[in-house]
Image: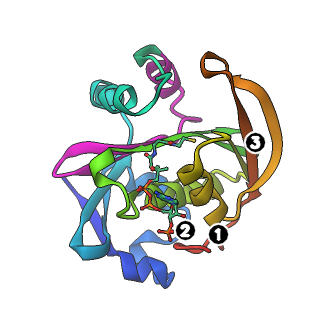
Amino acid sequence: MESYKFNFTDIQRNKLPKILVPTRWVENLRNQVVFNLENDFQLQIRRMESDDIDQVMKLEEQIFPSPWSAESFSYRLEEKNFNMSIVGLSDNRIIAYAVSYVVFDEFHFSNIAVEKRFRGKKIGETLLWLSLQIGVEYNCSFVQLEVRESNRQAIRLYEKYGFKKTGLRKNYYARENEDALLMSKEINWEIPYGMV
Ligand SMILES: CC(C)(COP(=O)(O)OP(=O)(O)OC[C@H]1O[C@@H](n2cnc3c(N)ncnc32)[C@H](O)[C@@H]1OP(=O)(O)O)[C@@H](O)C(=O)NCCC(=O)NCCS
């Protein structure tokens, strides 16, 4: 399979290879993009496809107390022009994913998950950053997401990327009786990787 490789340190310095100039992400992700993360960890990323749902569901059920159903993923993946979900793979096995979609000029970042034993390697950050780039490519001017009030790791990740708390959705996670923070941020091509 054709793929484009680039190094974590290049991305951190915002030195993207010429082949990955802005507005080419979505096209490149039809195949896959390979990120060399720290310690030479190779993360393959491509668009999420219907055939991925079984693998994604295994992670979803391991990770979330109220997992989405396979039908929810399937329904969203049918909306090819709006659904921008991506999967992260190691040795061709899905170890992470990010679900997002375009609603007019809003980019909605619905979910992100990294398999437990692969956490702390900048995989979540890479998927978030790339998703935001895709949002800009689709002419979105801002991004919104909901996150559990108690989810410290995810909130830290979003704050690192400049998200601010813009609202509270009462009892959003009804089964666990937990509120969601609504977090938002404006987006443009200037989102640096490794933003603090
Ligand atoms: C949130 C999650 C996706 C982060 O993925 P990850 O690959 O482990 O995170 P990264 O290595 O890319 O870390 C990037 C940043 O996230 C934050 N972060 C990640 N893990 C953290 C932790 N254990 N404690 C505090 N902050 C953390 C930090 O800001 C970190 O940047 P830093 O290393 O410069 O401090 C992962 O913990 C996960 O899958 N959690 C379960 C699913 C979930 O809660 N999803 C969010 C739904 S809204």
Give the residue type at disc 2.
Answer: Pro
- Tell whether 77 sits left or right of 109: left
Q: CA distance from mark 1 to mark 3?
A: 23 Å
Circle 2 or circle 3, nearest the eye: 3
Q: Residue 92: image x %, image y %?
A: 18, 47
Q: Ligand 1 closer than 8 Å to the CB at disc 3?
A: no
Q: Residue 169: image x %, image y %?
A: 78, 31
The residue tagged 3 is 182
Q: CA distance from mark 2 to mark 3?
A: 28 Å
The residue tagged 1 is 189
Q: Nearer the viewer, residue 19 or 108?
A: 108
Crowd around label 2: few <14 · some 14–19 · many ≥20 (10 Å):
some
Residue 153: mark in rendering: none
Q: Which residues are magenta?
A: 72-98
Q: Is residue 83 magenta?
A: yes
Residue situated furthest right in the rendering: 167
The residue tagged 2 is 22
Q: Quadrant of the C terminus?
A: bottom right
158 w.r.t. 69: above or below: below
Mark 2 or mark 1, which has the lower sequence index? 2
Q: Quadrant of residue 157?
A: bottom right
